[in-house]
Amino acid sequence: MKIYHKLKDISLLNNPVATIGMFDGVHLGHKQIIDKLKTTAKTIGGESVALTFDTHPRMVLQHDAYKLKFINSYQEKINLIENMGVDHLVFLPFTREFSMQTTAEFVKNFLVDILNIKALIIGYDNRFGNKENNNFNELFNLSRNNHFEIAKAEVKSIDNITVSSTKIREALDKGDIRFANKLLGYQYQLLGKVVMGNQIGQKIGFPTANIDLENDFKLIPSIGVYAILVEYKDTIYKGMLNIGIRPTLNINKLSIEAHIFDFNKDIYGQYLKIFLVDKIRDEQRFNGLDELVIQLQKDKILTLEILK
């Protein structure tokens, strides 16, 4: 897959078929769109092009960027789209001026003059151009005037729920990892560097890797204990993860700590990729470390049952 961050770097493509979106989550709904994108491109002997933005529109247009949390990091999005078999990924530079374009201007200035698309695939709820000019009928008329085909992908539903990034974020906020993963089509992941902690886990027989997340805007699931898989140097290990403030230790600062089963390596400064499989329980306050250890032993038994 070829990746473009500057419009001037886009060379002449062969019968390009495009789709556009933020693609946060690159979930099963997005997969349905991309499958249609690839099928259409193959039918006309063309190339598939996914268009996204280098900056989330709210970061440019609103003043609440600090509230934004994303399902995917920049690199995760790239990897997931590449794994779906897209030929080209274009990061459009989103600016306030860019946002003021009408749908007609965007179609002419970019899709036609720069990409020269032969077809456009859009999601059932796709919105682009300014808010007054983004309906499907207008896009259909523009496609005819500019000599390209247009098609709308079908809605993707699971358990009678429409798959969307919003639904996935809501599930993660509730700690419903199983449902989030079901909508994603893969296991939700966190990537971070192992940093020095307070060493209490080591003292009680449950050493943990304290994770400093790579991305400040990554959505952290709700506080609790999770069954996880951990990737370290291309090897997968089983483990459990605590996201919380460790009330038993009176620390009251959010931390992400992974206890990796059957693992005894010095990994400070190394990166771990953590795949969340299921939530075991909410975080609890215990009457001392002995009570905590008893619960951790129960958590491990349950985790191994889930992961087997």
Image (cartoon, helix red, strand yellow):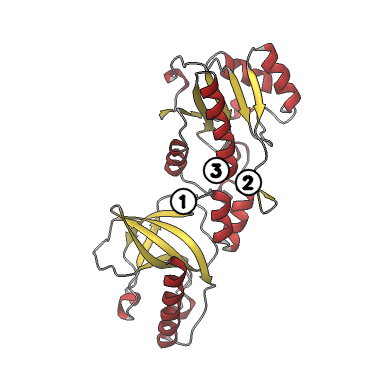
Element type at mark 3 = loop
Q: Residues within 10 Å of mark 2 (few under 14, many from 20)?
A: many
Q: Is residue 103 visible?
A: yes
Q: Nearer the viewer, mark 2 or mark 3?
A: 2
Compute the Cα span from label 1 to label 3: 15 Å
Q: Residues within 10 Å of mark 3 (few under 14, many from 20)?
A: many
Residue identifier under label 2? 164
Please state the horizontal and vertical placement of residue 25, each as a whole percent of the image: 53, 45
Please state the horizontal and vertical placement of residue 181, each as a whole percent of the image: 54, 55
User: Which amino acid, mark 3?
Assistant: Asp
Name which of mark 1 and mark 2 comes first in the sequence. 2
Q: Nearer the viewer, mark 1 or mark 3?
A: 3
Asked whether the beta carbons under mark 1 and mark 3 sit within 8 Å of each other, the answer is no
Q: Is residue 133 visible?
A: no
Viewer-proximal residue among 78 and 184: 184
The correct choice, above or below, for 42 with respect to 271 in the image is above
Name which of mark 1 and mark 3 comes first in the sequence. 3
Compute the Cα span from label 2 to label 3: 9 Å
Q: Nearer the viewer, mark 1 or mark 2?
A: 2
Viewer-proximal residue among 130 and 163: 163
Q: In which quadrant of the rendered view does residue 110 lie?
A: top right
Q: Residues within 10 Å of mark 1 (few under 14, many from 20)?
A: few
Residue identifier under label 3? 24
The residue sitting at 45% across, 33% down in the picture is 85
Compute the Cα span from label 1 to label 2: 22 Å
User: Which amino acid, mark 2?
Assistant: Ser
Quadrant in the picture for the C terminus: bottom left
The correct choice, above or below, for 248 with respect to 213 in the image is below
Please state the horizontal and vertical placement of residue 144, each as a whole percent of the image: 69, 14
The residue sitting at 75% across, 24% down in the picture is 137
Residue identifier under label 1? 216
